[in-house]
Amino acid sequence: MEEGPRQLQAPWPYSSGKFKNGLVGLSNGGLTCCVNVLLQSFYLTPEFTSILQRWDQMENDVNARNIPYHMCRLFDQMQTSKSGRVSAEMFLHCLQLNHVKVYTQNDAAELFLIVFNLLLDQLQTSAIVEEMKRLYEIKVEQLVQCSCGEVTVKDSRFWSLPVPVIGTQCGKDLTLEDGLTQFFSPQSVRSNSRCPNHDCKMKRSVQKSIKLISVPEVLNLHLTRFCALSSFTRKIYRSVTFPQTLDLNSFPVSERSQTCGSGQESWHYQLYAVLVHIGSALFGHYIAYVKSFKDSMWYKLDDTSVSQVDWMDVTSTFGGHGFMWSETAYVLLYRRMKTDDTKPSSGTQTVGL
Ligand SMILES: [Zn+2]
C-alpha cells in the first residue's frame, strides 16, 4: 500500500468530472453505497473541505488508520480524476482499522456521527477541531419542568437533529416543519432522576421542551424513518415534504440566543444535499441528490453514476408511494444563507466563505 505525506494545496478547485464541477462517482466495493453518499456529502460541502485542508498533517498522521489523512487523499484523487470515478478502497480500509463495519448495511445518520467523531478525535489540532465542531453544532437548552413546578435547564448539543416522522396525524402528508415543531414541542416523560426541589414529594412526571441557542453553518437533519421495535427495525415510508429554504427562527429560540433582537444573523437555510434510502430496514441502497455550489444545478449521485436532474426529481424522494423500492429522503443538509441572500440584493456580492 503506497503511503506518503500529501502535498498541501490551495483550496480544491472542484473542476474535475464530466460536469467540470468536482462531481466524481465512487465505485461500490460491495454494500459500500452508504459510505459513498456520506463521503460525497462531506466532499461537496466546501465549508467542510476548506477546514480539512488547513489541517496541519504531522508525520505520524501518515498511516493507514488516520481518518483525516485518508479523507484528504481521497478528495485529492476526486479533484484530479480523469475517468470521472474513483475508488474509496483505502478510506474503507482505514474505517475498518477504526473498527467501523463497512461491507454491511449501514445507517447513513449513524455513520455520519461515527465518522465525524473519529475525525474530531484524529484531527488533534485544537483550532481546526473547534472550527469543525462549529460547522455542525446545534446548541439547545432543554427545560425540564417537574409537576411540582420546579424547572431545571440543561444545555446540550447536536451534530444532527432527529426529526420525528410519527406521532403527528396519520394519513396527512407530513412536512419537515411539522416534524421539527414536534421535536421542539413540550413532551411529558417519566423521570427517574430526583427533583432538585427537596420538598418535592411528587411522583416524577416531567415536561421537557427544547429551545435553540445557536445554529450552525451546515444544518444536518435526519428523518427518523427507522424505528427499533423490540426485536426488529421497521422503516416508515410515509411522505415527508421538505422545502428548499427553511427558516429556523420559526421554532422556539432561547432568550440566551445571541441572535435575538436587533443585528441578528440569518437563520435562513438553503437545502443542498439529500441522502436517500431505497429499500427496507433489512436491505437497501443509498444514493444522494446534491445541488452543486458551483453551478447551482441538482445532480444525482448513485455510486459511479453521476447525472444532472432537476428539483422535481428531488421531490420524488418525499416518500409515501407505498412501494418499497421507491426513493425516500433520509438525511437533509441545509446551508445557512449569508445575511445578504435573504434580503433584496444591494448590488454588491460578498465573496468567500
Ligand atoms: Zn418536583
Image: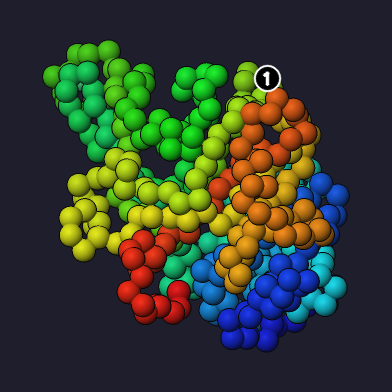
Q: Which residue does the numbered mark 1 point to in the structure image?
A: 231
Please, which residue is most extreme toward the left here?
A: 199
- Answer above or below: position of 64 versus 167: below
Q: Quadrant of the C terminus?
A: bottom left
Which of the 4 image quarters holds residue 319?
Answer: top right
Residue name at image x 31 percent, y 48 percent: 249
Which of the 4 image quarters holds residue 117?
Answer: bottom right
Q: Secondary structure at mark 1?
A: loop
Q: Quadrant of the N terminus?
A: bottom right
Ligand 1 occupies quarter: top left
Q: Is residue 45 left or right of residue 255?
A: right
Residue name at image x 38 percent, y 49 percent: 247
- Answer above or below: position of 44 versus 105: below
Q: Is residue 164 left or right of residue 15?
A: left
Residue name at image x 24 percent, y 52 percent: 257
- Answer above or below: position of 304 versus 286: below
Residue 5: percent from left, percent from top: 70, 83
Which color scheme did the rendering employ for the protein?
rainbow
Residue 15: percent from left, percent from top: 69, 78
Mark 1 crowd level (few <14, some 14–19, many ≥20, 10 Å Cα) = few
Q: Is residue 142 left or right of residue 292?
A: left
Q: Nearer the viewer, residue 289 or 133?
A: 289
Residue 71: percent from left, percent from top: 67, 68
Q: Is residue 288 left or right of residue 82?
A: left
Residue 221 in view (yes/no): yes
